[in-house]
Amino acid sequence: MSRTVKNPDERRSEIIDIAEELFLEKGYEQTAVSDIVKKVGVAQGTFYYYFKSKGEVLNAVIDRHIEEIRVGLETIAARDDLSAIEKIVGFSTFLLKFNKDRKNLFDYIHEDRNAHLHLKFENAIPPVMIPLFGQIIKAGVSERIFNTKYPMEAALVIINSKLVLFERTYGLEGILGGPEERFNAAIDFIERILGAKPGIFKEYGLIRGREL
Amino acid sequence: MSRTVKNPDERRSEIIDIAEELFLEKGYEQTAVSDIVKKVGVAQGTFYYYFKSKGEVLNAVIDRHIEEIRVGLETIAARDDLSAIEKIVGFSTFLLKFNKDRKNLFDYIHEDRNAHLHLKFENAIPPVMIPLFGQIIKAGVSERIFNTKYPMEAALVIINSKLVLFERTYGLEGILGGPEERFNAAIDFIERILGAKPGIFKEYGLIRGREL
Amino acid sequence: MSRTVKNPDERRSEIIDIAEELFLEKGYEQTAVSDIVKKVGVAQGTFYYYFKSKGEVLNAVIDRHIEEIRVGLETIAARDDLSAIEKIVGFSTFLLKFNKDRKNLFDYIHEDRNAHLHLKFENAIPPVMIPLFGQIIKAGVSERIFNTKYPMEAALVIINSKLVLFERTYGLEGILGGPEERFNAAIDFIERILGAKPGIFKEYGLIRGREL
Amino acid sequence: MSRTVKNPDERRSEIIDIAEELFLEKGYEQTAVSDIVKKVGVAQGTFYYYFKSKGEVLNAVIDRHIEEIRVGLETIAARDDLSAIEKIVGFSTFLLKFNKDRKNLFDYIHEDRNAHLHLKFENAIPPVMIPLFGQIIKAGVSERIFNTKYPMEAALVIINSKLVLFERTYGLEGILGGPEERFNAAIDFIERILGAKPGIFKEYGLIRGREL
DNA sequence: TATGAATGAGTTTTCATTCAT
DNA sequence: AATGAATGAAAACTCATTCAT
């Protein structure tokens, strides 16, 4: 094939794009480097010019997402026109949108073949999100809107239990309530954990379906 | 090699044992079927006489753990000499012990190489634990010890966030409190989520370090 | 499984039956001994009690067919109430019926996966059929109905080219005539090879569609 | 092993050559891919770089032969300095030579272990040869040298019964005539099938032993 | 930067066959 | 006559990675 020279950053980025597509479609293990290069339209060697190994692209894929999340949340956290409550609503809204834009990434990352992405995410998200989230809770405590002795741990629980994305049912459809009720439950739990006034999140605009 | 005939159940069980050991030691992907049979001391074919594929032993390994957990929790749940609070303390105690007995299974299942076990567990545990746990919360609500409109969802959050095993730090050591404080935080959150009287779990004996 | 004792001949025959079914369905190589015993409902070892090897059942399968053909043709050949012409018509009729009864065995034995059966047949049929067929041709020559210096070779050509089963088209549908025409062509060729009077086979009742 | 880079076409061709050698020597099933690469002197992976599967080389082997036959026959068919009779003599001569050059390929392809090659050939040859051969017969009919209503079918019978290579005896040595007589019989049959003047092929030079 | 031919260790799996019971 | 657990060699194929160009 004729050799196509491109801006290295573009090329790198292009490879990450395609890799992500394929990882999600077929799973990381099931995606061969040859699949990636075929779809990108470059030679096998080109891949290794840009990445030391297959694992490294996986990291790049994850990193890019984490980075997007970080930037999004930091932007919200930095705004001084928002109260702690509003920032948390902002976080939630941002994450719901982030997830939807990626075709419910956080949902189907639970499928067997996505074990690798899943774990990488699960390990990478807390270090990025907890400090930001915890800081806002702390601020909320100062503002006397929240009331907890454990702001950081609260952040961890809320993130970890995916309360902000309370969507999965684990095959418990008959047992759990419907989406609406699960959403309300999530808000209730967050309010309780944070020691906030019941109903305050709704007051501040966190309403299911209007999030985006 | 000389042929050793064994009771099929024993043999099967023996293979599962060794497989688990190796999966945890080297990771699922990194464990070859040949590693397993070598350690068990049987021929390659024997493995495939008992399991259709490598994946099937993984399932058997997981299933066995899940089954143990199920039996343990069901036993506690069935006791009518215990109040809801005591049962939850019992659950927590059981799981902490289960985890320690397996060399902190739930901790180091988070390592990269254990992505498969991790995800399988994460998907298999809720369907088994939520109904049991939720039922007890419901009972507690009836007993007026708990107060929540969302018992099942509460169960899900508590399980999912691993509040009963509040051990991991995700590299946030400087930010989160120490083990003692995290443990207290966990109890605080559970009490809040369930709408229980603050401090009630400690009263009923859930004290870190004395669990076992 | 409980042990079922059967008449050895029945059991043997039963194994051959099932083996044939499977060989035709999946191909010889693709049929595992374990497939056979599973379908028969006996243990793996039982198979080897009756047959030394997998190849031996294949032979048994072929032999049984060849034997049926031999008996069928010999019966016809032995009748002294039939002329040479009538016997050849009888042969043809017998083989067409034989083939149909076995779901067009000779047709789909050409599929890739049936390479083994195919070749075994192709090698086993001439030694059985040529002598019988050739003998009749010789008789026909004596009767002055046929006229050829090469009765045995004629037999070989007719058998080999499957003129008596002139059905396959080898993907030449556009080029060859339809079934009717191919049938007529076959008769024409046989008559010419044998030096018989044109049309004599039709006179003696060899008509397509009425063969059975 | 040191890495030798070659022109891909050469390499491919080299693999096909060796594969054919081994297939004929040991049989297709009995030849492992590892045998092939060992003999070629490349890595296992190199084989799979060029061929998707073992079966695909088999096809390549067959295709190459079929292609050679096609070219050979087409060349003869295209010559307008030859009469129909001469072309048929040419075909026969070409095939006899082709067979001899390949150490009687068509003979020992009947051995059990060559079932695959055998069947593949048997299925691949008619589509290539019948149209060419039939066309010439048609021309012969126009030239009034042949006389048959079924030129295509005649071609099929002659090819199928391997009349042009009337060599095999199927263990019927005592019953069939010797090679000379079989050769004469074959010519007799062809002449009869085509409705040609007896002896015409000899006149035109088709004489056993002088063919090459 | 980019190519793509070449590598080769490594893996799962299959299966005919054996043999103690 | 029959069982079925056990064997183990063999085989096809994968794929991340390298490297000469």
Image: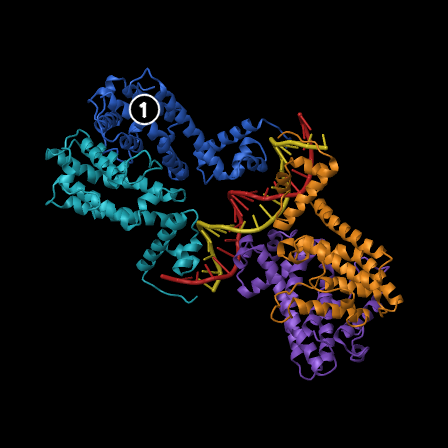
Chain colours: A orange, B purple, C cyan, D blue, E yellow, F red
Chain ID for label 1?
A: D
Quadrant location of the N terminus of chain A in the rendered image: top right
Residue C57: x and y in percent read 36, 50
In the displayed structure, D24 sits above or below B184; it is above
Is residue C95 visible from the viewing direction of this image? yes
Is residue A205 shown left or right of residue C121? right
Q: Quadrant of residue D78?
A: top left
In the picture, measured across the screen, residue F12 lies left or right of residue B134, that is left
* Viewer-proximal residue among B88 and C156: B88
At 21% across and 24% down in the image, what residue appears?
D196
Instruction: Decide if residue C53 is in sight here.
Output: no
The image quarter in which residue B67 lies: bottom right
Q: Residues within 10 Å of mark 1 (few under 14, many from 20)?
A: some
Q: How far across and down, in percent of the image, does residue D30 sit?
A: 46, 40
**Is C167 situated above or below B63?**
above
Task: Give the total of numbered labels.
Answer: 1
Q: Amino acid at mark 1?
A: Ser
Query: Where is residue C133 shown, x and y percent of the image?
Result: 20, 39
Outermost residue on the top side: it is: D81
Which one is nearer the viewer's eye here, E15 or D95?
Answer: D95
| Residue at mark 1 | D92
Location of residue C179 (image quadrant): top left
Q: Position of residue B123 (x, y in %)?
A: 64, 62
Image quarter hosting the C terminus of chain A: bottom right
- The answer to whether C108 appears left or right of B86 in the picture is left
- The residue positioned 64% from the left and 65% from the top of the image is A169
